Amino acid sequence: MSNERLVTVTVNGERRSALAEPRTLLVDFIRHGLGLTGTHVGCEQGGCGACTVVLDGELALACCTLAVQADGATLQTVEGLAPAPDRLHPLQSAFQAEHGLQCGYCTPGMLIAADDLLRRTPDPTEQEIRSHLSGNVCRCTGYTGIVAAVQTAARNLRAQATETRGVTAS
Amino acid sequence: MSIVGTDRPRIDADDKLRGATRYLGDLKPHGLLHGRLVLAMDAHATINRVIKDAALAIPGVVAVLTAEDLPTAMEGPMRQFEPLARGEIVFQGQPVALVLAETEAAAEDGVEAVIVETTSHAAVLDLEAAIKPDSPLARIRQIGGEMEGSAAMHVEAAGEGEGAPAPAAAAAEPVSANAKGPHRQQHGDATAALAGSEAVVKGTFRTSWVHQTYMEPQGALAIPEVDGSVTIHSSTQGAFYVRGMVAKLYGVDVSTVRVVGAPLGGAFGGKFNLIDPLVMGAALAVGRPVKLQLTRSEDFASGMPASACILELELGGTKATGLTAFRSRILLDQGAYGDWAMDGAVPVMIGGPYRWSAWDSLSYGVTTNRFGTGAYRGPGGPQVVFALEQLVDELANKLGVDPLELRLKSAAVEGDTGVDGDPWAPVAGREVIERTMQHPLYKKRGSLPANEGIGVAAGVWMGARFPSAATCRVDQDGGITVVTGAVDMSGTNTSFAAIAADTFGVPIESVRISYADTATAPHAPPSGGSGVTYSVGQSIRLAVEDAKEQLLDFASDQMDVAASDLEVVDGMVRPVGSPDRGKSVAHFAEQVTGFVATAPPIEGRGRFAPGNPSPSVACHVAHVRIDPATGEVETLDYAVIQDVGKALNPGLVRGQLQGGAVQSIGWALYEELQHDEYGQLLTGSFMQYAVPRADRVPNVDVDYIEVPSAIGPFGAKGIAEAAVMAGTGAMANAVAAAVGSRIRELPMTSPRVWRAANSR
C-alpha cells in the first residue's frame, strides 16, 4: 500500500484524482478509485470488451491498461455519454428502441465502441458495424438488435448533423 | 388499451444504458473481505496438506480457509455441498482453499503463496473407457446421499420424469461405479419396428463441453448481521433456491438466511448456488462480510458448464407415415459432480417433438474428472438435437421425401404418447413446421451456389412448472406495485409490467415492479427452465385481478354503482358506458391509505401452480458457406420459426429467439472446453474458448407464431430454451448440404469440416 501513486485524469470532462498502486488496472481505478461502476470487468484479459473506454481519443481496454499509464490522460466512460440526466445519447435511445441490450453487462463497452465507430464513420455498412464491434462480446442478444441500434443511431445522428448545418448556414 | 403484445422498451433499459445498474461487483459494504480461490492443479489427487503460513504472512491476508474451516453440517454428492475440496481433488480447477484479505490484491498474492501438497491419481476422462468395469474411479471416496432438487428440477423442466429404472434384463452391460444408470425408456418392440421400417439410419455423435459464458462472472457477497443471521447478495437465478440450499448445507434455519438477488449480468442456467456456499461459509467462519467474484479464467476453470455426450442413435421411418421407431444409447459426461446432469432426461428428449410407435432409449451418467455439470439453456437439448435431427434428415433423404415433410408427418400432437409414457400436452409442432415450409430461406435451398448449404431442424422444450406467488398493492397515487421474489431474467419484469397494466387498466407508467428478497417476497421459483413468465406472470395477473376486485368493491359503495358495472380504463374507475362519470384510481386509493379510513388498503394476492406444461416448438433454418480450402464455415443467414403462445412483448421475444439462435451457432461451430490427456483445461480464456462475435454471425430473422397456451398468462409459453434447441441440428444439416458429407462431432471446427470436405 505504501507505494500508491496519485493518478489524475480528466474523465467525462471532469478533472479527478485518486490513489492507485502501480499494479492497479485502469478498470479497477475507474470503478473503485473514481466510483464510475458503469465500466464493467468481463475477463481481465482483453478478450470481451466489457471494459472498453476512450483513452486520449482512442478506444482502450481498461483491463489491459494500468491506472498509472493513464495519469494525465483524458477518459470517456459510459457515464459521459448521455447529455443530461433526463436525456439519452442517440446511441442509447436507439439501443433502447431496437432492443440492443438484455442483461446490460456488455452494454457500456458496446456503446463506447459504437460511439467511436460513428465518430469516424458516420454512415457505416452492416459489415463495418459488425467488424468494429467484434471485440465486444454480447451473449444475450445475438447482435441483431445491436446492429440495428447502431444503424438507427447513425441515421439519427446524420439527420441531426444536417439540421445543425442547416441552422448554421441560415 | 393493450400493452401486452406491444413492442416496448425494457423497463431497466435506461439504467443499464447509463451504466447506473448496480451489479454484484459494484457492492462494497463496510468491513468487506475479498475472497480469491486456490484452484486445484491436478485433475485427480488426494490432498496431503495445505500449507498456509506464507500466505497468512502477507500483509492484508486475514484467513486461508479449507474444507475443514467451513462449518458445514452435511455432505452430499453435489458440488453445492462440497464448496471446497474435501480430501480428494476431482477436477483441475476445483476450489481447494479460499483466501480472504482486506484487498483484492492481497488476496491474489495470498493465493500465489498457498501450497497444496497432493498425491496424483489417474484422471478419468474418456467416457467409453470410464464405464468399463475395470476403469479407475474418477472419485475414490464415494459420497452418500441423494441428489437434491436441482437436477430433478431441470429434468422436470425438460418435461421428463427420471428415466424408469431399467428392468434387470436390460442392465446386461457390465459397468464401473463411474456409471450412473442405465436410465431407460422402452415402448413396444423397437427391434421389430425398425426391421419393419422402409429405411433405417444410424450414427454415433459426439458433443463438447460448453460454457454458459454469461458476461458477468459468477459472484456472491455474504454479510453477517448483528442478530446472527446472514444476508447474501448474489448474482443468482434463484434467491429462494439459494436460501434453502445454503441453510441445509450449514445446518441453519432458513429464516436466518436472507438472499437478495442482484441484477443478473447474464446467467443462461449457470447461476445456481455456485459461489453462495463459499461466501456463506466464509462469513460464518470469520464473522465479516465476504465477497467472491470469479475472474474469467476462474469461471472457465471452476464453473459448471454443459455436459459433453456420446450418442448412438438408430431410427427408422416409412414414406407414408413418417418416423416409426428409434433405439439410442447415450453416455452423458456429468463430470465430477452431477448437480444438473440430464442423464435421466436425455433418453426422453432424444425423441424430439415427434410421435413414435416404438422405442428403446437408454443413457448413463458418467462421472469423470472434468468440472461438474451445470445447467445451460435447454440442458441436454443441443446435444440430442445434433444427433436426432441429422438422422431425420438422412432418413428423409433415404426415403426420398422433403425433410420438413417427414417432420410434419411425424410431429406429435396432443394426446400422442410421449417417450416418457405420458400423453403430449397441446403442442404446435405441425403449425411451426408448416410455417417453416413457407419461409423464404427454406425455399431457397434448391438454388444455391457450390459450397453453400441450407439446413433445417426442429426442437421442443417442455418448460418448468414451478409454483409461485405474488402481491399487488394499490398506492396512494393510483399506481400499482407488484411485489415478486423472482429475479429479472431476460426482461421478465418488463413483461410483468405489461401483464399488470393490462389486467388492472392503468398506464404502464403507473406500474411498479418491486423485486423483494427472501425475507419479504411472496414465494418465487428460480428464474430458469423457461418457467418464470409462465408461472410468476400468471401469479401476478391473479394478484392484480384480486386488487382490482377490491378496488371495484370499494368504488361500488362510493359511487353507488354495482361493481360488475364498473371498469378501470387508463387509471380511471368508471361505470361501463359512462366514461365521463369516472373517478381516478388515486381518488379511491387515497381514501384507504390515510390516517382514518372506512375500508382497508387494497392488496391483492395471486398464487399459481401451472400443473401442466405448454411445450414450445421451434424450427431453425441455417444457411452456410464452406471454404473447401480451409474448412471454415461462414453462417450467411439464419431464421427462427417458433411457437411462443403469445408474445407479451414482441421486441423481447425476438431478442430471446435471436440470442438463442446465436448461442446455437456457438455450440455448432466454435465452443469447446478442451482438456489434455492429464485433464488440464486447454481453453481457459476468451483467447482459446471461442464464442460467436458480431462479425461471425448474420442477422437472425424471427418469424414467431402464436398458438395460445391455456395455462400461461395471456396465452404465453416459456420460450427462452426452445429458442436454443434446434440450432445444432440446423447448422449440421446446413454444413452437410454444403460439404456433401456429415460431421458427427461438435463443434464443427475448420479441421473437422476440412477433413469431411476432403474425404468425399
Image (tube, rainbow, N blue to C red):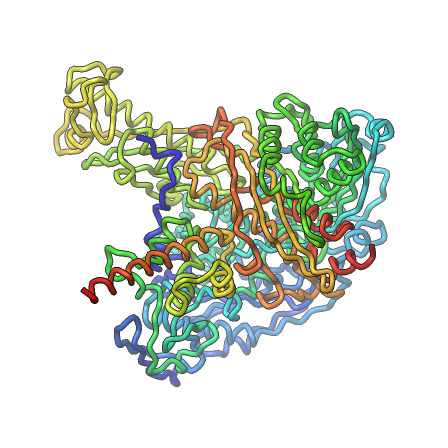
Q: Is residue B660 above or below residue B403?
A: below
Residue situated furthest left in the rendering:
B596
Q: Is residue B456 left or right of residue B566?
A: right
Q: Position of residue B581 (x, y in %)?
A: 14, 21
How many labels, in total? 0
Relative height, residue B572 to residue B371 (above, below) = above
**Residue depicted at 46% across the width and 41% down the height:** B653
Front in this rendered view, residue A7 or B744: B744
Q: Position of residue B108 (x, y in %)?
A: 50, 73
Observer-nearest residue: B229 or B375? B375
Occupied quadrant, residue B154: top right
Q: Is residue B346 above or below residue A142?
A: above
Res B517 → quadrant: top left
Q: Position of residue A76 (x, y in %)?
A: 34, 70
Which of B740/B77 is in front?
B740
Q: Tell which of B470 and B534 is nearer to you.
A: B534
Instruction: Report whether residue B233 is seen.
Output: no
Quadrant (top left, top right, bottom left, bottom right) of the N terminus of chain B: top left
Which residue is at 53% across, 75% downward? B55
- Residue B531's spot in the image, x, y percent? 50, 37
The quadrant of the rendering that contains the C terminus of chain B is: bottom right
Viewed as shown, does residue B711 lie left or right of B3? right
* Residue appearing at x 31%, y 80% in the figure: A8
Q: Is B136 displayed left or right of B19 in the figure?
A: right
**Name of the residue lying farthest toward the front:** A170
Q: Is residue B209 left or right of residue A109?
A: right
Tell me if I can see residue B92 in this picture.
Answer: yes
Q: Is residue B310 above or below residue B617?
A: below
Q: Residue at x 51, y 76 (%)?
A: B109
